[in-house]
Amino acid sequence: MRCPFCGYEESKVIDSRPTDENERIRRRRECIQCSKRFTTYETIEDVPILVIKKDRSREVFDRTKVLKGMLRACEKRPVNVAELENAISEIETTLQSATDREVTSVRIGELIMEKLREIDEVAYVRFASVYKAFDSASSFIEEISKL
C-alpha cells in the first residue's frame, strides 16, 4: 500500500476491523519510511456469475428472477419467503464457490429443484413440471414416483 504522505510502497497494518455494515474492512496502517499513519478500506470484489441460457446467450445471475420462479411454484403453499431467500442464498453460495464463473441455466434449475424438494414437495412438482416441460399426466406420475 503506497503511503499518501511520502509515496513509499510499504506499510504495516496496526489495526484491522470490519466496518459497521460488515461489508468492508478498515485498516490502520503505518508507513515504514516516514512513520505516519493512515487508514485504508478493503472491499471484496464480486465477480458476477454468468448464466448460459439454452439459446447460448449469456446474462448475469439474477436472484429476483429465481425468487419469482420459486414463488410461482409455492403459490398457495405454506412456505414463507424467508425459507426461499435462504435457499437462494445457498444456491448462490454454491455457484460462487465453483471455480467456473459461468454456469448453465440447466444447472441452476437442478439446484432450485433440489431446494424445493426439501422445502415443499408440491412446489417441487410444480416447478419441475414447467422446468422439465411435462407434456402428459404420465410425466407427472413418473416424477411423483421419484419422491
Image: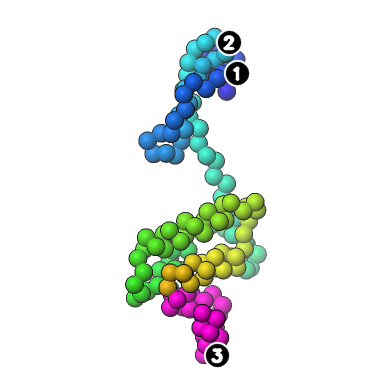
Circle 1 is placed at which residue position?
Answer: 10
Circle 2 is placed at which residue position?
Answer: 33
Residue 128 location (% of width, % of height): 52, 76
Q: Are marks 3 and 2 in contact (CB under 8 Å)?
A: no
Crowd around label 3: few <14 · some 14–19 · many ≥20 (10 Å) = few
Q: Quadrant of the N terminus?
A: top right
Compare marks 3 and 2 and give the one earlier in the sequence: 2
The residue sitting at 34% across, 76% down in the picture is 76
| Mark 2 residue type | Gln
Crowd around label 2: few <14 · some 14–19 · many ≥20 (10 Å) = few
Q: Residue furthest top?
A: 34
For numbered disc 2, what is the local secondary structure? loop
Of residues 119 and 138, which is closer to you in this image?
119
For numbered disc 3, what is the local secondary structure? helix
Crowd around label 1: few <14 · some 14–19 · many ≥20 (10 Å) = few
Q: CA distance from mark 3 to mark 2?
A: 76 Å
Circle 3 is placed at which residue position?
Answer: 138
Check the image and tell me how it is coloured: rainbow
| Mark 3 residue type | Ser
The residue sitting at 62% across, 68% down in the picture is 54
| Mark 1 residue type | Glu
The residue sitting at 65% across, 64% down in the picture is 56
Q: Are marks 2 and 1 in contact (CB under 8 Å)?
A: yes
Q: CA distance from mark 2 to mark 1?
A: 8 Å
Residue 12 location (% of width, % of height): 55, 20
Confirm whether residue 130 shows in the render.
no
Q: CA distance from mark 1 to mark 3?
A: 69 Å
Q: Relative to 117, does residue 92 appear above or below in the rendering?
A: above
Residue 108 location (% of width, % of height): 56, 64
Q: Is residue 23 left or right of residue 31?
A: left
What residue span does the magenta drawing correspond to?
121-147
For numbered disc 1, what is the local secondary structure? loop
